[in-house]
Amino acid sequence: HIPAFQKALSVIKRIESHGFQAFFVGGSVRDALIGREIGDVDLASSATPVEIMNIFDKVIPVGMEHGTVIVRYDGESYEITTFRSESEYQDYRHPDKVEFVTDIKKDLARRDFTINAIALDKNGDLIDPFHGQQAIQGKKIQAVGNPYERFEEDPLRIMRAVRFVSQLGYSIEEETRAAVQKQGPLLEKIAVERIAIEFEKMFQGNQLVQAIEICEDASLFQYFPIFRHYPDLSNDAKRIPYPFADFAEIISFFVHCSPELSVDDWTRQWKLSKQVKNDARAIHNAIQYYQDNGLDDWLVYQLPEKLTKPFSRVTGVLYSRDSAKLCEDVKMKREKLAAHNRSELAFQAKDLFDIFPNKPRGPWIGKLLGTIEEKVVSRELKNDYNEIKEWVIKWNPPGRD
Ligand code: ATP
Ligand code: MG
């Protein structure tokens, strides 16, 4: 009865009409059974990527060699992965050989945890050879098969176990937990980019503290950039009472906890994008300003609108403020701003040229406009052409320099 599945049903039926099998798998089946909001709907099929490309018009080959394509259908995207089994992971990144198989059960066997190894067919019947439903009942994260071997094959699964603790509020089954403890050092071999994805998801969960405690017990922080040299940061992490949305929030929080580290140190060592760096910087700058001046018009003016919530969330934790209230305050102040950006100023560069026709152009223009901007936003000057002009002439008499 889930709308996302209803829509995807026609994709499954279409694959089946060509003589192949297809199932819902992975996180969406798990989340539907739990009653959580489902994210992406992933499909597994006996059809190979080439066969899928022959069935659908719009197919994006994202990982042909692993058997993965994205199908665009009825305005939605579906990741379809060919049934496969995986054996050796010698470089700890990609399976040595990907073997396509014809049986969904073999495909389920290569998946990480029993809760993630359930398939759902078009009639709503579940294929659950590893008793994933039982694990959901018992709120347990349990490796499919021997956990020591599964973590050896792909140590990233250790990180995934921990982030599911945070996201689902489950505990890790005993033997799997022991394998987390034992195999932790294998994380050394995992690319930081892959660790970063799971680490970020850990902070997006509601049970961060439990997850952090497992990382502490299993000594995993030594495999995380920055944390390996600043182990006390794990205590700060435990102060975070609600989910953070992304790395920009995570970083601006921790930079405040350990100011000797910069936003750049974080994004460089975690190998994050420029986008994350820019957002983290903007949030960080706003928090610094807030610390000295509180919430005023100038802060709101400088804070990009899309960072209103991130700023409020992080400031809420750092200064024990109600983040929802803070967010509302920012929005209200933003509505009443004298100007929202430079183009809304009643006085522009060309107006300066009118007053100082003979003065050669240079950095003074930007500097003066910056001062005007600050005075207008903080209401020391009205956003009015004549008033600003008067002020400019008073403090910068023409011909003085
Ligand atoms: P999310 O809701 O965060 O997307 P997910 O369980 O769907 O969680 P994905 O990374 O989207 O996680 O992976 C989809 C499925 O692929 C998983 O449910 C699991 O069955 C399988 N899977 C993903 N990563 C691994 C891995 N490293 N080892 C084994 N199976 C994996
Ligand atoms: Mg998923």
Image (cartoon, rainbow, N blue to C red):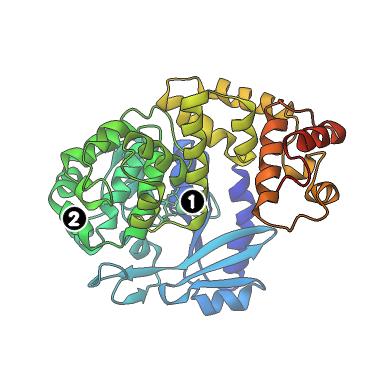
Q: Name the residue: 67% across, 38% down.
A: 371
On the rendered structure, is 335 left or right of 225?
A: right
In front here: 72 or 355?
Answer: 355
Residue tagged by mark 1? Answer: 276
The single residue placed furthest to the front in the displayed view is 400
- Residue 117 visible here: no
On the rendered structure, is 332 left or right of 86?
A: right
Look at the picture and state if 191 lies above or below 325. Answer: below
In front here: 112 or 390?
Answer: 390
Q: Name the residue: 19% across, 43% down.
A: 177
Where residue 356 sits in the image (x, y, percent)? 80, 49
Exactly how many numbered labels are in the figure?
Answer: 2
Q: Distance between the Cα atoms at labels 2 and 1?
A: 37 Å
Assess mark 1: CB under 8 A from ligand 1?
Answer: no
Q: Quadrant of the N terminus?
A: top right
Q: Mark 2 is on which residue type?
A: Asn
Residue tagged by mark 2? Answer: 146
On the rendered structure, is 55 left or right of 110?
A: right
User: Any mark on residue 331, and which?
Assistant: none
In front here: 97 or 343?
Answer: 343
Q: Name the residue: 56% across, 66% down.
A: 70
Element under disc 1: helix
- The answer to which quarter of the image holds residue 204 is top left
Q: Mark 1 is on which residue type?
A: Val
Q: Name the residue: 67% across, 27% down.
A: 378
Classed neighbour count for the residue bearing mark 2: other residues with Cα under 10 Å, few (<14), some (14–19), many (≥20)? few
Assess mark 2: CB under 8 A from ligand 1?
Answer: no
Where residue 336 sits in the image (x, y, percent)? 74, 26
Look at the picture and state if 254 lies above or below 266. Answer: above
